[in-house]
Image (cartoon, rainbow, N blue to C red):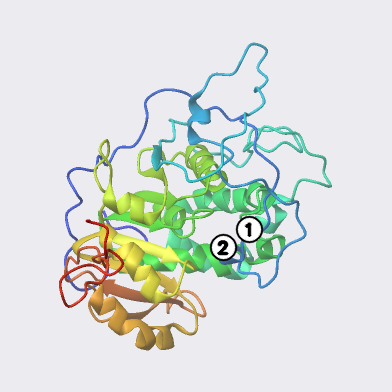
Amino acid sequence: MTGPGGAPPGPSPVHPDPAVDPVFSAGEVAADPSVPAGPATPADPTFSGESGPEPVVAADPAVEVTPAFLSEPLPAGGTPAPEPAAPGGPVDPVFAEPTAAAGPPSGDRGAAAGQSFMDGADRSAGEQPSPAGATLPPELADAARTLFGDRLDLAAAYAELLATDGVVRGLIGPRETPRLWDRHLLNCAAMAERIPEGASVIDVGSGAGLPGLVLAIARPDLTVTLVEPLARRTSFLIEAVQHLGLTRSVRVFRGRAEEAATGSRDREPLSADIVTARAVAALDRLAAWCLPLAVPGGRLVALKGASAAEEMAEHAAAVARLGGGEPELHRCGADVIDPPATVIEVVRERVVGPARKKGPKRSRGGRRRGSHGRDR
């Protein structure tokens, strides 16, 4: 089956890593839709597309929750217990597996007016963002049908999540809601034409799920791992995956890209045919984080802006040192959306080991500097 985006011309897809189980459903445990969320975080310009901060409430440090809370039973009475504060410092990388949801959403989100399914909190009409901002503009309907096919209703449900709970949690800027379809959803879905049929995908710095969740919606043939280090964002991603009924094709990894690539004693390193990223970093840093996650012959597919050509010229040498081939520029969806999505593509041609750490310098006599008299 070929998804609405189709498969790109060129090399055939690389077979997915057999060490990675493509089925990510945690069983028949029902998802808990009433988990409380912390205060709204400031909008992240990386994902909101805004040049300045939004007037939202400042958040606690990003390590205040753990993804495990989604599978914990509610106490007697049905009211979630207050969430204990987590210690500061780095978090251990962990797979936060979404549990099986009741099914894909319908037009009615199944919640009372003013209630957010993401955190189970009742909000007044003045506090809860309106889902009207997620309405598909009529002039974009044909493009949306072309890119999402018979899963357009699922894309609309995701747009509603972004326009409501995504704004409440500070993952999308409020001024971005009128532009969700043209600037975010359609732009990300157009990338699908560069991804082979049946490929495995790792989305680095997934944030609110752009482009990883969009690709999973547009291309049901893909298996997608969303890599995100911040707890507040991973909790949103897990609950969104459950709500959209994508638990069998999408999983969430809480941790940095470097942690995902190196693995641990209890977990194999992650790898995929395609590694995606959007608005994460400049190409040299992006290649350092993403290429180790691609299988040899796999590709980094990065959604970029108008300065993509200049970025390629500036960082081509750094990409080559990291084992990547010559960066290529592609315009995706040129016959569907205007302007088309700009994508930089880099093939992982060589496996490059980690850089050696420089040791202390030695004097001409062979003794390390600063060690004079220590062995006496």
* Residue nearest the observer in this picture, 287 or 295: 287
Dividing the picture into quadrants, the one containing residue 115 is: top right
- Is disc 2 placed on a helix, strand or loop? helix
**Quadrant holding the C terminus:** bottom left
Q: Position of residue 319 (x, y in %)?
A: 29, 77
Query: Is residue 261 shown above or below 349?
Result: above
- Is disc 1 placed on a helix, strand or loop? loop
Asked if residue 208 shows in the view, the reply is: yes
Q: CA distance from mark 2 to mark 1?
A: 7 Å
Sequence-earlier tag: 2 or 1: 2
Are the residues flagged by discs 2 and 1 in contact, CB closer than 8 Å?
Answer: yes
Please give left or right for residue 256 compared with residue 2 in the image: right
Q: Which residue is mark 2?
A: 47
Please give left or right for residue 114 compared with residue 166 in the image: right
Dividing the picture into quadrants, the one containing residue 33 is: top right
Asked if residue 222 shows in the view, the reply is: no
Dividing the picture into quadrants, the one containing residue 314 is: bottom left
Residue at the top extreme of this rendering: 76
Which class describes the residues within 10 Å of circle 2: few (<14), some (14-19), or many (20+)?
many
In percent of the image, x 50 and y 45: which residue is there? 234
Query: Is residue 41 shown above or below 302?
Result: above
In percent of the image, x 51 and y 35: which residue is there? 66
Which class describes the residues within 10 Å of circle 1: few (<14), some (14-19), or many (20+)?
many
Residue type at mark 2 is Phe
Q: Position of residue 132 (x, y in %)?
A: 71, 54
Q: Position of residue 212 (x, y in %)?
A: 42, 56
Q: Which residue is mark 1?
A: 172
Residue type at mark 1 is Ile
